[in-house]
Image (cartoon, helix red, strand yellow):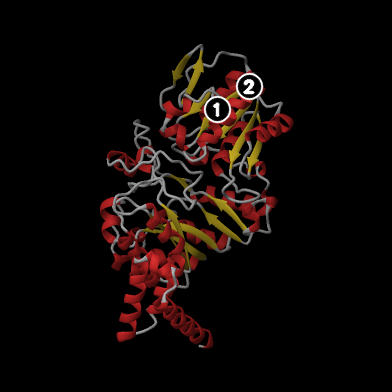
């Protein structure tokens, strides 16, 4: 059988990026004797043009396989329906987070014949084996299949307990040399699957309920296996200058991480980037990160309001803990980047100001800001639905400068103000912190006032011009020093 994966990746930029989920699926299928191809959609699609390109370049495929987040699923629903009209014999299947969490909605899409709930490597392989031999598709674990007007709902498939049993991901499926990854000089990897935490804005707590056979949701590849993957990729793409680990939390298991970092430094030696959490880091882990070559540590702050972190997001991390650990990392020469959000339920313009001010105190080497997006089946989505915050609007990704919520104490205009002016105010507050005594109190009060009065800020009144003048003066001092 020939499977053509259709991967919508148009928010990344021209060239797209490597995605291990599809690479792993492809590797399993190839090991079983099937053929695979990738239709990498890296620009915002026009459906008719996309279908025409598929028919021209992948028209000999037996299966069109989509991977869907909630943002992308509307594109997949329309595209799959048009594909079925043009190529009726084509079997269409969709997996990924959205059909896993919303299977009834996904299978209802007229253009989809099959959906995959959970990890799809073995389910998709079984489907291909059945179709190749001409057998009727039986009830396959992990798959929901339309047949004769009915839906065959396969039972949930256990999580893959031993990730080492999977073949090395099929990186050749992706055009690395024309990708965003190549442009950034990186190779990306995942050493694990799953996250044990229950952050309300994330879907991990929902994924954990899918399998009840006792298979752990959080699993790590062995250190030897992960290093083998890195060595193999480096031999094929020697121009890569750094490694980026996309695991939710690479430092989750200290014993595993200790063994990994010791061997990574010796066998690989490239600087790397990884994700962690403030409440999992300590002096020992920071030392391991430093000695093994961690160049960037990516951390989710999300909100600078301690109560919102604890009570709304279920991220019980104190300001003091966060400040101490960032200083510890900075002292070891590790650069860090913070993930932030505005427009969170329960937030106000004043509470969002705390996020800017805490970022200023933390002095991250980089930070990323997004407007909170309510993903279905998450706990925070349920809260939004219960309180009537949902507007029904959808976006292509959470990187867009728009909110889909109607919050009673944080109107859209204020959310967009906070989002659009976050980085300017971050610079202002950083400047304020360079002063002491009455000057600091005066300037901080002035910046606070401007944040809380968007219309006054927009008119560039004398207080704002005075602030800009003071800001530029301090910047000149900093350059001279």
Q: Nearer the viewer, residue 339 or 442?
A: 442
Marking on residue 93: 1
Q: Secondary structure at mark 1?
A: strand
374 left or right of 60? left
Name the residue beneath numbered marker 2.
85
Q: Quadrant of residue 19?
A: top right
Q: CA distance from mark 2 to mark 1?
A: 15 Å
28 left or right of 461? right
Q: Position of residue 158 (x, y in %)?
A: 42, 31
Q: Position of residue 46 (x, y in %)?
A: 63, 37
Q: Quadrant of residue 416?
A: bottom left
Q: Position of residue 285 (x, y in %)?
A: 40, 63
Characterize the local packing of mark 1: few (<14), some (14-19) or many (20 or more) Cα atoms within 10 angstroms. many
Marking on residue 385: none
Q: Is residue 8 above or below residue 467?
A: above
**Labels 2, 1: front one:** 2
Residue under the image location 58 percent in, 28 percent down: 80
Q: Looking at the image, can residue 309 be seen?
A: yes
Residue under the image location 37 percent in, 32 percent down: 211
The N terminus sits in image quarter: top right
Q: Secondary structure at mark 2?
A: helix
């Amino acid at each position: 059988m020939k499977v053509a994966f259709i991967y919508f990746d148009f928010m990344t930029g021209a060239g797209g990026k490597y995605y291990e989920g599809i690479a792993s699926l492809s590797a399993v299928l190839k090991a079983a004797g099937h053929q695979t191809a990738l239709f990498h959609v890296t620009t915002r699609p026009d459906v008719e043009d996309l279908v025409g390109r598929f028919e021209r370049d992948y028209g000999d495929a037996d299966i069109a396989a989509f991977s869907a987040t909630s943002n992308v699923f509307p594109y997949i629903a329309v595209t799959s329906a048009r594909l079925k009209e043009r190529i009726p014999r084509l079997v269409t299947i969709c997996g990924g987070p959205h059909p896993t969490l919303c299977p009834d909605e996904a299978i209802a899409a007229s253009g989809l014949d099959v959906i995959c709930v959970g990890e799809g490597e073995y389910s998709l392989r079984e489907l291909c084996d059945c179709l190749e031999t001409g057998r009727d598709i039986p009830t396959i674990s992990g798959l929901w299949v339309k047949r004769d007007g009915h839906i065959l709902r396969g039972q949930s498939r256990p999580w893959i307990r031993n990730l080492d049993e999977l073949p090395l991901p099929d990186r050749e499926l992706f055009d690395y040399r024309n990708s965003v990854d190549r442009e950034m000089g990186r190779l990306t990897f995942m050493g694990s699957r799953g996250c044990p935490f229950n952050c309300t804005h994330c879907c991990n707590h929902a994924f954990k309920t899918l399998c009840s056979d006792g298979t752990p949701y959080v699993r790590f590849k062995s250190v030897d296996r992960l290093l083998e993957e890195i060595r193999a990729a480096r031999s094929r793409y020697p121009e890569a200058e750094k490694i980026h680990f996309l695991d939710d939390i690479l430092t989750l298991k200290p014993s595993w991480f200790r063994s990994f970092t010791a061997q990574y430094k010796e066998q690989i030696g490239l600087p790397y980037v990884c994700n962690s959490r403030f409440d999992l880091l300590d002096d020992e882990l920071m030392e391991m990160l430093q000695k093994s070559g961690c160049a960037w540590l990516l951390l989710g702050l999300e909100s600078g309001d301690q109560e919102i972190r604890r009570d709304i997001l279920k991220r019980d991390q104190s300001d003091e803990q966060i400040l101490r650990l960032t200083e510890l990392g900075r002292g070891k020469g590790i650069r860090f980047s913070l993930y932030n959000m505005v427009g969170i339920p329960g937030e106000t313009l004043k509470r969002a100001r705390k996020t800017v001010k805490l970022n200023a105190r933390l002095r991250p080497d980089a930070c990323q800001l997004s407007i909170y997006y309510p993903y279905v089946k998450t706990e925070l989505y349920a809260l939004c639905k219960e309180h009537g915050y949902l507007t029904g609007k959808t976006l292509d990704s959470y990187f867009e400068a728009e909110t889909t919520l109607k919050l009673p104490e944080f109107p859209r205009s204020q959310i967009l103000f906070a989002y659009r002016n976050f980085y300017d105010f971050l610079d202002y507050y950083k400047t304020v912190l360079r002063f002491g005594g009455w000057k600091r109190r005066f300037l901080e009060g002035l910046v606070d006032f401007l944040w809380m009065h968007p219309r006054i800020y927009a008119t560039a009144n004398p207080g704002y011009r005075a602030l800009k003048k003071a800001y530029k003066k301090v910047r000149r001092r900093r350059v001279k020093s």
